[in-house]
Image (cartoon, coloured by chain):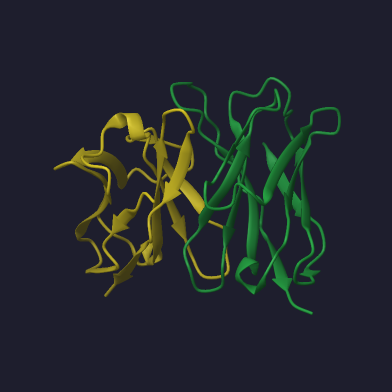
Amino acid sequence: QLQLQESGPGLVKPSETLSLTCTVSGGSIYGSYDYWGWIRQPPGKGPEWIGNVYYTGSTYYNPSLKSRVAISVDTSKDQFSLKLSSVTAADTAVYYCATLERPGVSGYTASWGQGTLVTVSS
Amino acid sequence: QTVVTQEPSLTVSPGGTVTLTCASSTGAVTKSYYPNWFQQKPGQAPRALIYSTINKHSWTPARFSGSLLGGKAALTVSGVQPEDEAEYYCLFYFGGAQPSWVFGGGTKLTVL
């Protein structure tokens, strides 16, 4: 069964870059039918889609975050990563990595990491 | 900015049936929005229930079903159990030149 695990610093200073990695086990990123995505959830609020990457490296980003976000994939390590630059307190959230359905493609298997809280504070 | 709207809260009695909906600011929801539904309990990650409007995951209880209803995506829970009390979120896909995904604001389902 596919398992995803987020890792990275839990505290980031304002104006710096938030960096997280998602490690996939129980399956392979390479050749997967699904998208590999990042979602965040500020305390007490609903989830917000950040962006997706396909195993080929193709990416899609939330327009509201696009200027600050970069998502990359390393199929040799079965990892994909998130970088969010110029962070502020508004970026404080639980960050999840997850598989997302690729429209029009069958065989989707949903899987989410447990989430990691990232706090932006000096 | 596309907005996906859900009922903020709903209350249902144990054993009853309840329908949660998701509407899009862009117009009527169709299967091309590939609606997904998630359940989230406090302190836990969201758990996927439904994908592609109607499809259940292997772990989705039979009492949960997805559909399109009156131009919205819908999640119906039949024979509600106390453990169904949770926050429910929908997720829509918006295609085009720059595809994007948008979550609804969530529905707090209370079983009372």
Horizontal side of residue B57 vs B32, given as left or right? right
Q: Residue at x 35, y 35 (%)?
A: B33
Q: How many marks?
A: 0
Residue in the foreground of this view, choosing between B79 and A36: A36
Percent across and percent down for residue B94 are: 40, 36
Residue A90 visible in this rendered orientation of the protein: yes
Quarter occupied by the N terminus of chain A: top right
Which image quadrant for residue B72? Answer: top left
Q: Residue furthest right?
A: A76
Q: Residue furthest left?
A: B70
Horizontal side of residue A2 vs A109, given as left or right? right
Residue in the foreground of this view, choosing between A68 and A96: A68
Residue B78 visible in this rendered orientation of the protein: no
Which chain can be seen in green?
A
Which image quadrant for residue B45? Answer: bottom right
Quarter occupied by the C terminus of chain A: bottom right
Percent across and percent down for residue B112 are: 26, 75
Horizontal side of residue B34 vs B10, given as left or right? right
Percent across and percent down for residue A14 are: 75, 71
Q: Residue at x 29, y 58 (%)?
A: B6
Q: Residue at x 49, y 65 (%)?
A: B41
- Chain B as rendered: colour: yellow
Horizontal side of residue B12 vs A94, given as left or right? left
Q: Is residue A17 above or below residue A90?
A: above
Q: Residue at x 36, y 49 (%)?
A: B2
Q: Is residue A56 above or below residue A93?
A: above
Percent across and percent down for residue B95 are: 41, 31
Q: Is residue A108 above or below residue B79?
A: above
